[in-house]
Amino acid sequence: MRDAPQEKLVIDDQAVGVFRVNRRAFTEAEYLEAERRQIFEHCWIYAGHESEVPNAGDYRSRRVAGRPVIIARGDDGVVRVLLNTCTHRGALVCRAEAGNAKTFQCPYHAWTFNTRGELIGVPGEESYSEAFDRKEFTLGKAPRMETYRGFIFVSFNPRGQGLNEYLAGATEYLDLVCDQSEAGMKIVAGTQAYSIRANWKLLVENSIDGYHGLPTHLRYFNFLQESGGMPQGHPRQRNKALDLGNGHSVIEYDSPFGRPIARWVPAFGELAKARIEATYERLQERFGVERANRICHTGRNLAIFPNLVINDIMAVTVRNFFPLAPDYMEVSAWALAPADETAEDAALRLDNFLTFLGPGGFATPDDVEMLESCQRGFANREVGWSDISRGMRRERPKTDDELQMRTFWRRWNELINPPRSRRAQKAA
Ligand code: FES
Ligand SMILES: [Fe+2]
């Protein structure tokens, strides 16, 4: 039976419109431990994208839910998520971040595994008894692995919902991102890797927070205005926040910035205009006006519980992050782009991407500063609660409301403090 925290962590009073989060959820090691067991070991967790390992033998090693893993495309063409620990005595069998390999050889005693994870070489094997069977020493795998349109997820929980069911309403928004290109989407080479001295849940909140856009990123919006980066002649009507089920949420809005997919702005230059209009027309033929407008002209910030963010904004960023301590997380972010884009389009997209996103962009350093500032502020334990009630009584919540964060916190609270245990606590 799972342990439940003894204190109230979320106040959710829908009748009066009050939603508060106990700041100890951001600072206490006991909650990080509960998150490890009850969230990261329980939910579907994003591991990578199939396009990152396009050829047989391609691999990426990274940490997923606190575990070192290898995403490898075997010589049979099958993508697997292998647990990066030698079945002999534990060492990491793959130490490089990425590459193409025929085998993985453990550096400790040189056991060798093929790209399917099978043990194929043991130095001095004759010294083992007859009980020694190579088949028992295949590299471990995550109990479950499934993909959705190229996005690879793993679950360390052998039971529970399948990925599609888990993603719930988030699939509609993943589709809007993936439908940008008939050729499919790919992760662009290169990773933005950085760390933040703040609790990981602050980055979930921040990634879908329309309220902070202007005050925190005023510099960026001034820059856009001065450099022809704002779209002209498109009314800005769409503006909504949605609970997509299972803790996932999205904000969707008419984009205030150019989108290389098909929302032209003067800063993209006249040359790009014809290409962008052609893309829009093609999408209109494929999907009709309404869906083409959504794909091209609206932006969306999508949070898939617990720690995957896909922001389809002035470019598409795929970001996940894991806590190492209550006040420290590691972030990895990638650019997602149409698999068939030309070099010119890639340059435009990456320029747009890097201007705003990433550790050297206009936005990310400001966001990091705000998150670290919140975490420093939490040292004042006398102020015990954060307020997340904005727009709570509004029938159609907007992007600068906080419905999307409440959606996350409600699911978080269910998993950390399950209802059954709450009833038991009450009875006790
Ligand atoms: S720990 Fe890998 S070969 Fe010994
Ligand atoms: Fe931001």
Image (spheres, rainbow, N blue to C red):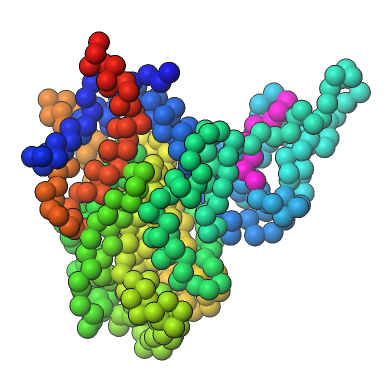
Quadrant hosting residue 418: top left
Q: In the rendered picture of this protein, how many numbered marks are placed on residues?
A: 0
Residue found at the very far right of the displayed protein: 126
Residue 158, horizontal then vertical, whole percent: 56, 33
Q: Is residue 205 magenta?
A: no
- Considering depth in this image, is 352 or 143 the residue closer to the camera? 143
Where is residue 348, by image quadrant?
bottom left
In the image, is 421 to the left or to the right of 339?
left
Which quadrant would the C terminus be assigned to in this image? top left
Let me know if residue 348 appears in the view. Answer: yes
Q: Percent from the top left, x then y, of residue 147?
A: 55, 52
Q: Quadrant of the N terminus?
A: top left
Rendered position, 268 above or below 242: below
User: Can you give x and y, in whole percent of width and height, for residue 143 in the image?
Assistant: 59, 35
Which residue is the extreme one toward the top?
428
Q: Is residue 84 magenta?
A: yes
Going 27% across and 54% down the picture, which residue do you hit? 242
Q: Please tell me which residue is depicted at 26% across the width and 16% down the height of the picture.
A: 425
Residue at left offset 32%, top offset 66%: 299
Determine the residue positioned at 73% across, 44% down: 116
Vertical side of 229 occupied by 190: above or below: above
Residue 387: x %, y % from top left: 15, 39
Is residue 361 in view? no
Q: Is residue 123 left or right of residue 233?
A: right
Residue 27's place in the image compared with 53, above or below, is: above
**Magenta span covers which residues?**
80-88
